[in-house]
Amino acid sequence: MSAMNEQSRAAARAVDEARLWRRMMDMARFGATPAGGVNRAAFSPEDIQARKLLIEWAAEFGFSTASDEIGNLYVRRAGTTDEAPAVTGSHLDSQPKGGKFDGAYGVVGGFEALEAIERAGVETRRPIEVVAWSNEEGGRFQPGAMGSAVFAGDFALEDALMAVDTNGVVLRDALRETLDSTPAMARRDMPHAMAGYVEAHIEQGPRLENDNLTIGVVSGVQGLCWYRVEVFGAEAHAGTAPLKGRKDALKSAVTMVAALEQLMADESDTVRFTVGRFECDPGAPSTVPGHVLFTVDFRHPDLATFVDLGGRIKGVCEANARGSEVTVERIIYSEPVVFDAGVIDLVRGAARALDLPHMEMVSGAGHDAMHIAGLCPAGMIFVPCEKGLSHNEAESASAPDLAAGARVLAACLVGLANR
Amino acid sequence: MSAMNEQSRAAARAVDEARLWRRMMDMARFGATPAGGVNRAAFSPEDIQARKLLIEWAAEFGFSTASDEIGNLYVRRAGTTDEAPAVTGSHLDSQPKGGKFDGAYGVVGGFEALEAIERAGVETRRPIEVVAWSNEEGGRFQPGAMGSAVFAGDFALEDALMAVDTNGVVLRDALRETLDSTPAMARRDMPHAMAGYVEAHIEQGPRLENDNLTIGVVSGVQGLCWYRVEVFGAEAHAGTAPLKGRKDALKSAVTMVAALEQLMADESDTVRFTVGRFECDPGAPSTVPGHVLFTVDFRHPDLATFVDLGGRIKGVCEANARGSEVTVERIIYSEPVVFDAGVIDLVRGAARALDLPHMEMVSGAGHDAMHIAGLCPAGMIFVPCEKGLSHNEAESASAPDLAAGARVLAACLVGLANR
């Protein structure tokens, strides 16, 4: 589907750059931080304000709204039939020191596409929906991508409801407050059928900007696993304990990380291997460390490589323990996702038809689309963000790029809704 | 001087194991912790109580007391002349979670030696003194070994008086309170001549216990230097930033530590090389670390090796920075100290004459004797401590071992005082 029909073209044309930008800034007021970012935790008062704003926008156009048991919020424009809808969306919650665009763009840009389709007077066979998935960031309640994971059956609703934040608030209670804030809202069961899903998002990396491109045609999401490695040595006096008898947790951990770097060596620079957290106790200069905790974040787009390298992490740590005890626990495991070829073609075709410079790329970060891809044909649209910065209050994106992404999205939604 | 004369022998015989142990326990009441250790910060109310107890003991025997401008406290048994005294001592302050023996043994055991000499009716040509050096641990006011360093002219009195604790208390004020608590005490100028100095201390390492020996004949103190290494990389998203473009402060730091381990490789196991503090920011599993701070603690008894290896630490860090910026700052530098051959012989001779199993050893930790060794012939006597534990509330030593050390000390002091 590389040619675009007149309906899709009309919808794309009706996207309004200034209106979209204004809405992005309106949304960014909820949880705005002094440094220009956003702190909008899932099911917080700020999240509730953001949800209410989306509901207000929907009401202006007579779009219906509904939510489900995990708080996912749906805005629906009716089709000429009640067949399964074409869906877009992302999330309204943010990192504690997040930016204005991560997640919010997929919801606000999705609404802009919906309004454009409406203003262009385009009728579609299927309904079109915009979803704000609950708690994608996982900053307050773990795990992240919770709304889409529960929707897709990848995570149990009962477990999600029992999540507790650092203040001891149980998710069930925070969610009830959120749902009670809009008592008239219709309820839906999970999951319900979707004809297709396209999510728009900032890239969160530098490649589009570096290559001066506007649209990323996302072919999939790389696999991601996290390991938590704990090294148990024995504290000793730095001046007196001979080196040969020490169980130095720091030196053991350093050797493990160096060995993991060798394991992960990759000329093609496709592997993503990060030790982001590294804590050493007791942390006194003249005491041999007795305990180290570090994390491994490993990502790869190819399933076979992902499984092979990921499966060797534990063994490499154990083989380099140098007399310390070591425990290696896998705390996140998410295999690579390959998006639907038809949706990828739809996105590429729309970008081409709209003369937008584009490239195919794999997402480095996880997104709600990963879970929805198990239920229906799914894909994503990336737009550039400044210097690739994200999860950062300085996160930024340009109004023309955001509008370009919304045009591609509007065209794709019309296409999916008439399939 | 390997044979011991009758005066020395009589003094050694008069050491009373039960009395010494009782005094150790009496002293340990000041700052006693629930876990059985001692928290007695320099110039604290507990330190003042400890000083007053020592002064009480001195008064019982008519020994004179005096203090100087940094609060070092002297107990003096007169000689038949006023020539420069033979001196012993250590410190009464402790680590925040310290033990009963570190430092206190050198003062209380020194007083036991003085009482034994007195009770044995031994007259000496020179006076004999026991000193409680101020603030050896440096737990509250930095730097440590302050009293002996200021006495020896290794650290300026004016700088010492301006030290501030974490509550904002200036050392000058805490010291004034300490000195005002004993208003009648005589004052002395610094430094004053000493004929010789021998300090008794627990080993703070496992070697005597492991070899089933009672006395360590300390030949010197190994050199010690500390470096503070800061690595400045650039934060990035673990999922999106290609490895080749990263400035990963953690991976840079790990490579530096591994290279330092190679530099410090030593078949003889004499080198002491420790990375005790290692902090990584921001510490999120999915963020490439932008900053790492770590410390290097390096010790060696041989001056040439100490200077050579210590001098290469900065270069090794810089050569392994892997694109990060690195700063390497030397924050402590203390060259190896070799004690006086005559004093070493005196200690060895006394241990041998008293049939105490002994070995010659280098001190792994720093002591006040390091500073005094620049002023007069100096040496040290070590006794075993359980499992080598020190700077720990579980620190322990046996009454017989402590008494054995005090016997050797009494003999040495008589020897030095008649030289």
Image (spheres, coloured by chain):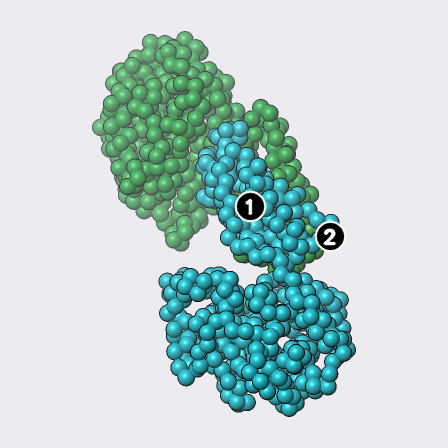
Chain colours: A cyan, B green
* Left or right position of A90 against B137: right
* Left or right position of A185 against A399: left
Q: Which of labels 1 and 2 is toward the front?
A: 2
Image point 55% across, 34% down: which residue? A322
Quadrant of residue B317 within the rendered picture: top right
- How many numbered marks are there? 2
Residue that extends furthest to the left in the rendered view of this protein: B60
Callouts 1 and 2 in the same chain = no
Image point 69% across, 54% down: which residue? A270
In the rendered image, which quarter contains the N terminus of chain B?
A: top left
In the rendered image, which quarter contains the C terminus of chain B?
A: top left
Task: Where is residue A130? Give x, y as percent.
Answer: 56, 78
**Residue tagged 2:** A268
The tag on residue A106 is: none
Image point 25% across, 18% down: which residue? B119
* Left or right position of A8 against A335: right
Determine the chain carrying the residue at label 1.
Answer: B
Task: Where is residue A313? Give x, y as percent.
Answer: 58, 45
Task: Where is residue B316? Give x, y as percent.
Answer: 66, 40
Check disc 1 and give the amino acid type.
Phe
Q: Nearer the viewer, residue A158 or A33?
A: A158
Is the residue under label 2 in contact with that under label 1 (CB below 8 Å)? no
Residue A206 lies, with reference to residue A52, above or below; the image says: above
| SS state under label 2 | loop
Q: Residues within 10 Å of mark 2 (few under 14, many from 20)?
A: few
Check disc 2 and give the amino acid type.
Ser
Q: Nearer the viewer, residue A263 or B1?
A: A263
| SS state under label 1 | strand
**Residue tagged 1:** B294
Image point 50% across, 47% down: which residue? A329
